[in-house]
Amino acid sequence: MSSKSTHRDILLVVDLQNDFLPGGALAVPDGDAVVPIANALASRFAHVALTQDWHVPGHLSFASSHPGKAPFGTILLPYGPQVLWPDHCVQGSVGAEFAPGLAIPRAELIVRKGYRREIDSYSAFCEADRVTRTGLAGYLRERGFTRIYLAGLATDFCVAWSALDARGAGFDVYVIEDACRAIDTGGSLDAAWSGMREAGVHRVTSQALMT
Ligand code: VGL
Ligand code: ZN
């Protein structure tokens, strides 16, 4: 990116938090592999922002909030189907902290999401009710960014939903595939890539960006 990154480009590093790493409450297989890649990418971008999954205790996306329900099942909430997860990324917990190996002090913004008990938010732009906005699109527009590059966890949830919403908000979107890892439950990864392809999300490698 040294030659190509412009002031219209921003790298958005999604949810590189302890709970999504091996040993965490909602571990993404091989999730720790993307930390050094994100660090390397970040050093090539003029602008970087981070997202942080940031749930209140008792969040409705937690299986533990629904007696008799198990993680990775689905329930119907007022806004539609909701996958149930193990308790994860609770505000102020160690699990919600960024990966210890993440070294991106230059990040200009940290977007927190999922902090309303009744609404999940995979997307960094729009919560799961598909109405409540995080404010990120407005921020990025006001800063003059037109291209968003995505890395982080998980490919099939927070990365994919963020990519789709970024497209919907009119940005050019690139998912850096080797800088992401997936949860892959119930066909979610295939569905995510098809949805992103149909929406015109570009799929690139970190190598292509860093050479
Ligand atoms: C995520 C499930 C629940 C993610 C967050 O970061 O992809 N997935 N909360
Ligand atoms: Zn979450």
Image: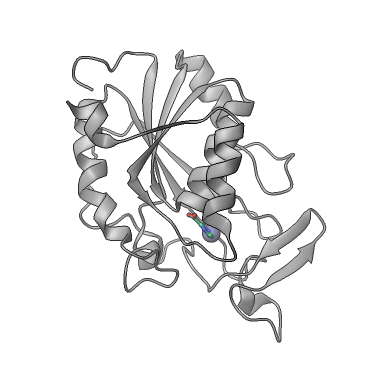
Q: Residue furthest right?
A: 78
Q: At which x and y percent is residue 16?
A: 35, 52
Which of 134/202 is in front?
Answer: 202
Q: Is residue 135 left or right of residue 88?
A: right
Q: Is residue 135 visible?
A: no
Please say if 130 is above or below 23.
Answer: above
Quarter of image, res 77: bottom right
Please say if 192 is above or below 86.
Answer: above
Question: At 48% across and 53% down in the image, what residue appears?
Answer: 53
Q: Is residue 208 visible?
A: yes
Q: Is residue 161 left or right of residue 110?
A: right
Question: At 26% across and 15% down in the image, what residue appears?
Answer: 4
Q: Quadrant of the N terminus?
A: top left
Q: Is residue 190 left or right of residue 117?
A: left
Question: At 49% across and 22% down in the image, what residue appears?
Answer: 140
Q: At which x and y percent is residue 110?
A: 41, 40
Please say if 170 is above or below 196.
Answer: above
